[in-house]
Structures are given as structure tokens and as C-alpha cells.
Image (cartoon, helix red, strand yellow):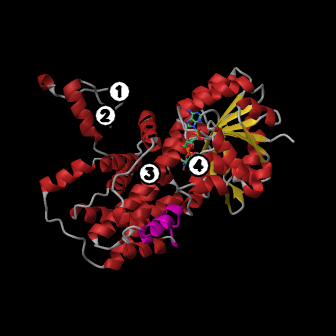
Amino acid sequence: EQAEIGLIGLGTMGSNLALNIAEKGHRIAVFNRTTSRTDAFKANAGELSDRIVPCHSLQELAAAIRPPRPVIIMVLAGTPVDEQIAQLREVLSANDIIIDAGNANFRDTIRRFKELESTGLTFIGMGVSGGEEGARHGPSIMVGGTEESYNRVEKVLTAISAKYKGEACSAWLGTDGAGHFVKTIHNGIEYADMQMIAEIYGVLRDGLGLNPKEIAPVFDTWNTGRLNSYLIEITAKVLNADDPKTGKPVVEIILDRAGQKGTGKWSVIEAQQLGIPATAIEAAVAARVLSSLKTEREAAEKAYGDLGLGRISGDKDALLADLELALFAGKVAAYAQGFAVMSGASQQFGWDLPMPTIAKIWRAGCIIRSQFLDTIAEAFSAEDNVANLLMTPAFIAMMKEAHPALRRVVARAAEAGLPVPALSSALAYFDAYRQGRGTSNLIQAQRDFFGAHGFERIDAEGAFHGPWGSNG
Ligand code: NDP
């Protein structure tokens, strides 16, 4: 019996995805560059082993799958994907579908899609979120490619995806790079989410002087309210964990230098290219970069010494309530920005991205999964053409309630010398966004003064210059 689908790359993600596919009843042919890994995978697959066809060459892989063949590539993003595609082209035939499920840059996906278009093969760029656990038991799946090609693999993708109250977290989002773009923005939002949580942790640790065991229950409690989400849940778990070697809370022995693999940076670059402000995401990416300057930061701490910036005092319960609401308000701004970037990209790249669907398939399986995304899905479903989440009636009401807390937290953190870059840029974004008359009139005057760039008037049509005379 031939396999229904193939998979290349039995690393962390690929092997878990393959087991997930097999578990849902699909026979799957697998190939890995390092052959021993393929054999070990089959040997360790337990009762799923019957449905796994190990292949030692791509020829074998192609022969093992029933045409038209869907083949998932789950290898290191970048050149390895191009190499795999080139080799696969040799053994596949017309109507076969190559699915890149790694974290590709969507611009590479657009290129690959175009390159394969003329060969009779079809290309799908598929964003998969949820890490190892998600891949094994149900990820969120964001698909880009032709709708026709999605229809052909929809059954298996729906089967392996996460479910939110029975609804599959897998969807076709648009042509060529749409799926990988949405995955990129998912990760950008994830950066902002994580950074804001870390900022609140900083206020609790350094502003209130709480230890990890005291902070954990705060997050646990928040997880039962409006902040209910996977990231809040694991934050509490992380704070509760002890290092087996020293017996200390494990967070305290972890170096404060954050890694990144590029999707956050891509989000920011694309936002800038599109001219869509994504300040909270930008702040989160910059914060990781700044965190990596460990030696410089240590030197600066010495150079500036004790600036006498105190702890945060006052009613602890009131502050905790503020922190919860501030984190929520910051989150609203970050998500509004992420969705605005997708909206801009949708126009730019001709995707027609379905915002309610995107919010829906993020409700389970992925790293940013949360209750909140259900609220976002509702807000996007209630109206057509939402320009910005901040303009939907539901979110206007929520921000009216939450912004004072964000304001107080940012102000008190600033006074105490505690960096809250993502929260404060979220607040600045909110304040600038809701300001009908801003301050760029002055910038236009300056630009005209030194560069004769001209300006528009509030009381007449056309382009004008200021009375700067020979000063300009
Ligand atoms: P791993 O490092 O666990 O596995 C990498 C896989 O790629 C291995 O099968 C490896 O084969 C193969 N590979 C590497 N280079 C080549 C090459 N030049 N030619 C052929 N095969 C190659 O990575 P992950 O499973 O974690 O990640 C795979 C993809 O999934 C990446 O794009 C990643 O960004 C993405 N991803 C990862 C997530 C995660 O949480 N880990 C979450 C979502 C997406 P070999 O055994 O021969 O070395």
C-alpha cells in the first residue's frame, strides 16, 4: 500500500509532525538527509510504526507515495530548502505538491512559488506554530499557495491541526507567501507578548522586590482572567521551576541574554517597508538586541552607579490590578499593530488575508494562543474592513477601561528606572493614534525651512511654503 503523503526532515519539528500525521490514520513516507535518523525514527515510532515508510533516497520516497504526491519539507530554513526542492524536482511529476513547512521568509516562498509554477509542480508555503508539542499533538497551520492545492491537502492538515472548541486551526490564507507572512507576524506578535510579560516581571521583581515563587501565583491568577493564554500559563510554570543543580529558581540562574532566529526582525522590516507602525513589536525586537549587549550593560551599570531610583511603593493589590490591566492594554496595541501590518501586506501583495480566520486559527495550537484571540476574531467578524483593531467598538470599550492602568504602570516604571520599552511604546502608539491633531505640523515646517519640501495648509488646498525668507 502506498503512502498518502511524504515528509523530508526528521528533526524536532518534522519527526513530531510525521507522528501526528501517522496517528491521524495517514500512511506517511519519510526521508532524512542523515539516514540513521530515518531508521531510528521508524524503530522508535511504536504502534505508529506500521504507518511509517522509511526511505533512504528521494527516489524511494517518490515511489512510496501515491500520485499526485504531497511532500512536506521540514528542514532548516534557507538554502537547505532550495537544495531539497531542486532534488525533489528530479523525482516528482506534474501535479505533485511540495509543501515547505519550515520558518521560511515569505519572500523566498514567493520566489519558490513562482519558480515551480512553470514546472507543473505546485508549491505551498505553510507556517506551522506550536513548537514540538504543537507539531506532535496539533499545531496552528497557516497555508499559502493556490486554493486548489490547499483543497487537496486540506483533509490531512485539518486532521493534524489543533482544535479550538472543535474548530480546526488550519486555513488557507492566500496565494504564494501568504501563509509564511502570517506566520512571521504571528512570531512578531509573540515577541511583543513575551517582552511585555518580561517587563511586568521586571516591575514585580525589581520594583516590588518579589521573588520568583511570589511572582508565579500572580501570573497563575491572571491566567484565569482576561490575560488567559499559553504564554501567561508557562510563565507561571517557569517561575515555579527550580534548578536541579543549585536548588535555586531556574529563572535566576539563566543569563539575561535573549536569542532570536529572525522572524521578529522580519516582521519589523516588513512593517517598515509597508509603512505601518508596529512600535511594540519593534521595541520587543530591540529589547532582545539590547539584552544581548550583556558586557556593555554591565559596564554601563558600573559607570552610572546607583542613581537612587527607588522601589515602587504603595498599595500592592492596587498595583497588581494595574499591572494586569496594563499588560492587557499593551497586548491590545501590539495585536492591533500586528493585524494592521497584515492588512497592509494583504493589499501590497494581493492576498486578501482573512483577518477573522487568522485570529481563529491562532486560538489554539500556536504559541500566542489565548482567549483574547477569540475576542479579536469576534471583533473582525462583526464588521467588514476593519482598519485597526483599536477602532472596533469592542476594543474601544476595552481600551477606555484599560488605558489608565497602562499609563500609571509606564509612569511609575519610568520613575523607578525600570525599562518597559514595549509597554511604553504601546502607550505612545495609542496616544498618537487617537490624537486627531498631532505635532507633525512642526515637522513639516522644519522640513520646509531647511529643504523647501513644502506643506499643506489646514484652510486651503495645494502646496505652500513658509515665510522663512533667506533663512530657509
Ligand atoms: P532541527 O534542527 O531539529 O532539524 C533540522 C532538520 O533539517 C534535520 O532533519 C536535518 O537533517 C535537516 N537539514 C538541515 N540542513 C539540511 C540540508 N542542508 N539538507 C537537508 N536536510 C537538512 O530543526 P527543527 O525541526 O526545529 O526546525 C525545522 C524547521 O521548522 C525550521 O525551519 C524551523 O525554523 C521551523 N520551526 C521550528 C519550530 C521549533 O519550535 N523548533 C517551530 C516552528 C517552526 P539531518 O538530520 O541530516 O541533520
Disc 3 crowd, CA 10 A, few/some/many (<14, 14-19, 20+)? many
Quadrant where the N terminus sits is top right
Q: Which residue is mark 3?
A: 191
Name the residue type under label 2: Arg
First reached walking from the N terminus: tag 4 or tag 1 = 4
Q: Which residue is mark 1?
A: 462
Q: Are marks 2 and 1 in contact (CB under 8 Å)?
A: yes
Q: Would you say the beta carbon of the disc 4 residue lies within 8 angstroms of ligand 1? A: yes
The one of 459 and 162 positioned closer to us in this rendering: 162
Residue shown at 64% from the left, 42% from the top: 36
Q: Which residues are magenta?
A: 224-244
First reached walking from the N terminus: tag 4 or tag 3 = 4
Check if residue 237 falls in the magenta segment.
Answer: yes
Quarter of the image for residue 66 reads top right
Badge 1 element: loop
Q: Are marks 3 and 1 in contact (CB under 8 Å)?
A: no
Above or below — where is 104 with respect to 432?
A: above
Disc 4 crowd, CA 10 A, few/some/many (<14, 14-19, 20+)? some
Name the residue type under label 3: Tyr
Above or below — where is 134 with respect to 182?
A: below
